[in-house]
Image (cartoon, coloured by chain):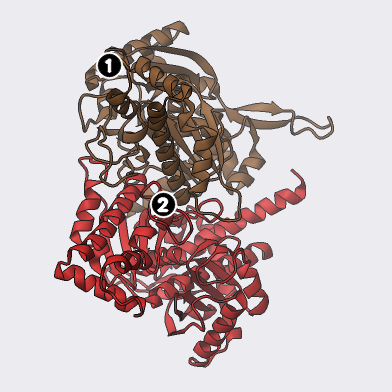
Chain colours: A red, B brown
Amino acid sequence: MSPNDRSNTASDSRERTRAEVLAAIRAEPEIARIDLAVRTGVSPATITAITQEMIRAGLIEEVASEAGRSGGRGRPRVSLKLRGAAHLIAGIKVSFRTLSIVLIDFEGKMLAEDTRPLSAPRLSPEGLLTDIRHLLADATARIGRSTADISGLGIGLAGTIDAVSGFVHWSPSLTERNVHLRDMFEAALPMPVFIDNDANLVAKAEQLFGEAKDVRDFIVVTIEQGVGMGIVINGEIFRGTRGCGAEFGHTKVHLDGALCRCGQRGCLEAYVADYALLREADISLPVNPGLPPERRLATLFEAARRGDPTARSITQRASRMFAMGLANLVNIFDPSLLILSGERMSHDFLYSDEVLAAMHDAVVQVDAPPPEVKIHKWGDQMWARGAAAFAVEGVSEIAVRRLAQNV
Amino acid sequence: MSPNDRSNTASDSRERTRAEVLAAIRAEPEIARIDLAVRTGVSPATITAITQEMIRAGLIEEVASEAGRSGGRGRPRVSLKLRGAAHLIAGIKVSFRTLSIVLIDFEGKMLAEDTRPLSAPRLSPEGLLTDIRHLLADATARIGRSTADISGLGIGLAGTIDAVSGFVHWSPSLTERNVHLRDMFEAALPMPVFIDNDANLVAKAEQLFGEAKDVRDFIVVTIEQGVGMGIVINGEIFRGTRGCGAEFGHTKVHLDGALCRCGQRGCLEAYVADYALLREADISLPVNPGLPPERRLATLFEAARRGDPTARSITQRASRMFAMGLANLVNIFDPSLLILSGERMSHDFLYSDEVLAAMHDAVVQVDAPPPEVKIHKWGDQMWARGAAAFAVEGVSEIAVRRLAQNV
């Protein structure tokens, strides 16, 4: 090991300690130095030194804590918290037809939010950049700031995305494959950019402000145009080796089964996605193919509710395939919590009591309670908040790296 | 937080630091104190104190290291390594018809191995204990030791097992469900006992002495009587919340499909296990049902090789279902390495080139190399070594807890 290697490794170790300390501060509204030492296993002397650096760098601040006073006597204990004003953070969710944005401060306080139409459902990377540029300018202007004030931008979009390298293997929102989207956006925008699969960002949002607070292992299945999945193991998003994991919608539920938009056969999506339902409805139901998809779907669901046998056969097959797919996830991950999440869960055929009962029946039977299932309908703003939370982590990492290198 | 809570947490933190240090020593044949400090991020002063404790406790020892000498000059650097004589460890694999044992020292050096018949394929917990007692007594006697000298016993068996609590929800080797097997064995034997699903122990063996050294994320699929899976994420075995995850053999590959021994329909095992193949062969092939299963299977495989259309149809369906199941694992986990492992992989219909090609075709297509697939045929001794390695970790944990409490 050369002296150079060693000093890099020592700097890595300093960085890791600082990252743990900042993460522990971020995890609580406020925390005393002594609790920080206990929580992180770092010595109180080191905690004092590191937090002093962070205060000087403007990342955190001291607050007088009421919690530390025992029985109202004694002087108030001093705690630490993130300094909201340290950074302005933006999170954007790219949907099928819309872009949603939130602006938050470093503490996570919401400063602004907006949703507007995309200029087209599928865009070139340059086209998406233009839409995002306008959205950033307008959203920051509304709070008297500018794009240049943003310290970090998180972006979530559907597709197969390597979040570590910011590389988009494929996304339904883009006309091109294999795009170094983060590098391209960072070259054109004044702040660091963090890109991830949107279902991963939903998982992050569920963990930070949703149904999965303090849950270490959980799975989020998102239902939108397609079926997405976010996996959290030991508190961290699991991404696979190439950033290509969690492709729940393209797990196969039938050998040589229905044709999927991905070109393969038997994918779960080919049974439960909107296009899969419409493909069947178009065969045998009197649904006008000239109408927009939403109208045709509404007609199908209405017919199923009325008891039309063909319509019921269509939605029931989708329900049963979805239940089988969910059961497979439970059989593999044995999570404590499974969240079905997304804006477009307006039709309950994918999460009705029957679906959940069918799922339970297909899980390996042991004399222990099955995982809890939560249904969480929410809109694009929550996905954007997940993207912003991802950017907060990224900006924290950059700040911590700077601190560790300056020691 | 009461003062008591705080002191427990501080002891936890001491324990965690010591566990990291011992794990770092275990990971290398030998390691210098300064490298240990760099590797763990623990200060050199603390490393000196902790390693001194461990030397006093007899867990590790100093060795003169040649590696530290630059150009042959200077005095040899002192390194640390595990002390082999510190503990005698046993690992046992419970198979369908046999028990295999290895005895190793604390460094992992093999001292003895043996395999003998189980008194019956399915036993009461007491019956299994009796068989294990005899095996331990005989194996230790052969190296001039006794059962009382064993510091830890690891046991791997098939089934749904919560390794953390040592609770067996269900195992094909036991006549009873819901057995606190570890507690029962520990009450009857003089050493701590560690029990896990056998496929998890294969994963541990692959990680320590097999095909997955230095691989952080990989999956092992085992093919024996049934289909097992071990998942390693970030270097750790992933067990799920209740210890009921990784049930690959009971993921469903066909809605309302073939009946499985578990009572459910469409499980992967119901298409690829021996009983599934024989069920089909018995319908239409001239295979004498009076013969033992191995002979009937051999006849089926021979007929398929000869090109008999029915026999080929039977094995090919199994191949294709297995390929689809493997593809689903890759789509979900995106591992860098997939190992197909086990003693009974004598017939290649589950891992032929065609199977692997079919798997690749059913994986989400990106312009990045697919995971590496390794075929690793090995016998029960390697499973037993995995069980022993699990016990080494358990014994290390106990030793570290003692050290941390005595500080």
Asked if residue A336 shows in the view, the reply is no
Residue A48 in sight from this viewpoint? yes
Q: Chain of mark 1?
A: B
The kind of secondary structure element at disc 1 is: loop
Across and down, in percent, residue A230 comes to 41, 59
B24 relative position to A202: left or right: right
Quadrant occupied by the N terminus of chain A: top right
User: Which residue occupies 50% across, 54% down?
Assistant: B364
- Neighbours of disc 1 within 10 Å: few (<14), some (14-19), many (20+): few
Q: Position of residue B126 (x, y in %)?
A: 22, 19
Position of residue B107 measured from the top left corner of the image (x, y, whole percent)? 54, 25
- What secondary structure is marked by label 2? loop
CA distance separating discs 1 and 2: 37 Å
Q: Pointer 2 indicates a residue of which chain? A: A
Residue A69 percent across, percent down from the top left: 33, 70
Question: Could you tell me which quadrant the C terminus of chain A lies in?
Answer: bottom right
Q: Nearer the viewer, residue B7 or A51?
A: A51
Which residue is the site of mark 1?
Answer: B289
- Nearest the viewer among A190 and B222 is B222
Q: Quadrant of residue B21?
A: top right
Residue on which the image places disc 2: A251
Relative height, residue A124 to residue B66 (above, below): below
Which amino acid, mark 1? Pro
Q: Nearer the viewer, residue A206 or B8?
A: A206
